[in-house]
Image (spheres, coloured by chain):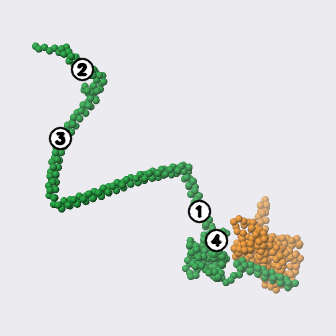
Amino acid sequence: MIESVLRPFSTLGVRFLALLEELGRAATLFAAAFRSLRNAGVWFPNLLPEMARIGVASVPIALFIATFTGIVMSLQASYTLTGAIPVYFVGTLVGKTMILELGPVLTALTLAGRVGANISAELGTMRVTEQVDALETLAYDPLAYLVVPRILAAVLMFPIVVLLAMTIGIASGWVTALQLLDMSSPEFVKGLRLFFDPWDVWFAVIKSVSFGAIVTGVGCYCGLRTEGGAEGVGRSATRTVVVASMLILCLDAFWAAVLL
Amino acid sequence: MDRRREALVGFVVLLGIAVAVVGTIWLQGGWRRSMVELTAASASVGQLVPGASVRFRGVAVGRVEEVRLAPGGDAVLVDLSVDPGLALPENAAVLVAPESLFGDWQAEILNRADFPQGEFLDYPQEGVLPGTALPDFSRLTATADEIARNLTVISERFEIAFTEETALNLKNAIDNIGEISNGLNEMIAQQAERFEDLSRGVNASAEELGAAARSARISFERVDSMIAGFDVGGIMANAEASAENVRALTEDMNASLEEIRSAAATADSAFGRFNALMASAEDGDGSLGRLLGDPALADNAAEAIEQMRALLADIQENPKKYLSLSIF
């Protein structure tokens, strides 16, 4: 009787302690990775390849998504802004939305699936095949070799990819407005410039840096914590995408509250 | 292969940075020539923000660079950058106004005389243009809302006050006023006629007075001439004799009046007695009273008189029948 009453509390306590343990492990991992920045000789040679893999290789998918996001934004803006609202507000809406929200967040969510899952699967495979243990045995700093270059590459390349995605998204919205909405370029540009603030771009860059760190950090943590063979690798990849996406949205709200 | 990858990464990074820099500059208004800096002061600036356009005669000639509070906080200073070729108008001022209904504001350079209703702030600093801001749409809508509420209250009160009975009363009042107006018109017309008559009478009187004055003047001239003829003694003697005659006449009249007063007293006494007699007759006292009050008695009296008249006639015809005259 008493045990059945206490069971829910016990379950809640176990889960909460598990969460704290996870957070502690993650904080320990990132602190160790931060300390590994000293081993530049280990991580720096891998930085450029990781930038190419994480950043350059992600540009096409980011631009593809941004293109259609811009098209949809322009069409939906013209659909919404009818009647007394001037049509040049389509440019305002497309520009503001792409720079402040959709450019960084959609790109980050996309890269959480592409980059985060990739890193998690890669490191998870290395973990279950004991390659990470081999590196430790060889006195090779696995964090400096595996984690630091990936996180640094994401921090450096995510803003670049986001900036390109924002540009392409606005451009596609512009073309859509010209071709499908009977707007003129001066009208669209007027709306685009109407409430433009350079701080908006910095806001997007700051968010992108944090998103890059989150996506690769979660990918690395979940990958290095992989257990149970191929099935565990799959679980780690899935978990990476889910956790990274949630953290991206939480960070998005955080930055909006703090910076705007 | 590595070289190619490096180049690719470098290209993408540069491309991203270039896009960000160029896009930001372009969205801020593009590359501009060297601009002239102006500063305007206003009591408030509405929703004017840096980057808003500066217009002159409707043409964009620059942009707002900064909006800041003046030291002390009693004004707002607006820094403008405008085209160096712009010739400022005489008495230049800055009007901050909404550019559209959707929150974007602009600063317009104009001649202060072109907007006389504006309360421009003259900032006590050399080179600072006076400025003013139009009210925000929210204030206008709030004012309009207040006016609408007042109108609603007025219409409700009017609806309460102006019933059908009120309308009828009002109609009657208007009719009455019309009647009063007609009466007043008639009275004014009559008074006008009377005034005309009066004025004619006054004129006639004035003319008569003039004639009397002329007669008096002639009389006075005659008197003067008589005085000048030394006949005053005779006149005075005649006047004294006339006065003596008047005095005697007055005494005779006094005596006559005394006799009249005595006769009136006698008549008054006679009338008093007659009144008493008539009163007792009306009351039925005395023979006359009974005669007046009793018709049968009057008829009997008339019959007795008739019989006496017949008796007298018979005596006159046959005296011996009634009179036996014997001597001794």
* Amino acid type indicated by mark 2: Arg
How far from the left and from the top, in percent, is residue B11?
A: 81, 82
In the picture of the structure, the residue carrying the numbered disc 4 is: B98
Depth-wise, is mark 2 or mark 1 nearer the camera?
Answer: 2
Residue A1 placement: quadrant: bottom right
* Amino acid type indicated by mark 3: Glu
Q: Nearer the viewer, residue B84 or A254?
A: B84
**Residue B259 shows which numbered tag?**
3
Q: Residues within 10 Å of mark 4 (few under 14, many from 20)?
A: many
Residue B54 placement: quadrant: bottom right
Under tag 1, what secondary structure?
Answer: helix
**Residue B309 shows which numbered tag?**
2
Depth-wise, is mark 2 or mark 4 nearer the camera?
Answer: 2
Q: Chain A drawn in what color? A: orange
Depth-wise, is mark 4 or mark 3 nearer the camera?
Answer: 3
Q: Residues within 10 Å of mark 2 (few under 14, many from 20)?
A: few
Chain that is green in the image? B
**Residue B146 shows which numbered tag?**
1
Under tag 3, what secondary structure?
Answer: helix
Q: Is residue B156 above or below residue B42?
A: above
Nearest to N terminus: mark 2 or mark 1: 1
* Amino acid type indicated by mark 4: Pro
Q: Nearer the viewer, residue B223 or B178?
A: B223
Nearest to N terminus: mark 2 or mark 4: 4
Instruction: Tell me the CA gap for discs 2 and 1.
Output: 119 Å
How far from the left and from the top, in percent, is residue B40?
A: 60, 78
| Disc 2: host chain | B
Quarter of the image with the N terminus of chain B is bottom right
How far from the left and from the top, in percent, is residue B202?
A: 34, 55
Depth-wise, is mark 2 or mark 3 nearer the camera?
Answer: 2
Instruction: Tell me the CA gap for discs 3 and 1.
Output: 101 Å
